[in-house]
Amino acid sequence: MSQVLPGDAPLVLDLIGIGFGPSNVAMAIALNEHNAHVGRQEPVTAHFFEQQPSFGWHRGMLIDDATMQVSSTCPGSPARRRRPTASVPR
């Protein structure tokens, strides 16, 4: 866990994340939940660095005006689950 340092000593972090993609978003959520559970006993300190000035999901890869794309060919896609089959007609 991080050390408490006197006066002008540099801040020491337990974890840094480079980029704020899916893995680091999951890590930030896990750290938040951990710190909420342990309180001030053993919190984990972290800082995430991201070069983008604002959030952008799949920047430059989406259809115009789309905010998220889900392929209906993906096994877990809601569109695929609703597709009728011989065993599950509509």
Image (cartoon, rainbow, N blue to C red):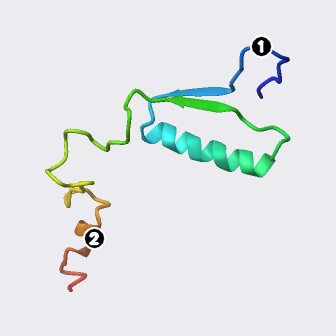
Q: Secondary structure at mark 1?
A: loop
Q: Residue 53: give x, y in percent of width and height.
A: 38, 33
Q: Position of residue 81 (x, y in %)?
A: 27, 70
User: Which image quarter holds the C terminus?
Assistant: bottom left
Total tally of numbered discs in the picture = 2
Report the mark closest to the observer, 2 or 1.
1
Q: Nearer the viewer, residue 7 or 21?
A: 7
The residue to which callout 2 is attached is 81
Kindly indicate the quadrant of the structure image that contains residue 51. Answer: top left
Image point (81%, 37%), residue name: 42
Give above or below for 56 relative to 2: below
Q: How far from the left and from the top, in percent, is residue 73? A: 19, 58
In the rendered view, does 30 fall on the left or right side of 12?
left
45 vs 75: above or below: above
Numbered disc 2: secondary structure: helix
Q: Residue at x 83, y 16 (%)?
A: 7
Q: Is residue 44 left or right of residue 74?
A: right
Callout 2 touching callout 1 (CB < 8 Å): no
Pointer 1 residue = 9
Residue that lies at the very extreme toward the bottom in this rendered image:
90
In this view, the residue farthest toward the front is 7
In terms of sequence position, does the residue under pointer 2 or pointer 1 come before the other? 1
The extreme left residue here reads 64
Q: Amino acid at mark 1?
A: Ala
Q: Amino acid at mark 2?
A: Arg
Tell me the quarter of the picture where residue 70 sits.
bottom left
Q: CA distance from mark 2 to mark 1?
A: 56 Å
Against 51, is 23 above or below? below
Please tell me how crowded label 1 is: few (under 14), some (14-19), or many (20+) other residues with Cα within 10 Å: few
Q: Position of residue 80 (x, y in %)?
A: 23, 67
The residue sitting at 72% across, 35% down in the picture is 44
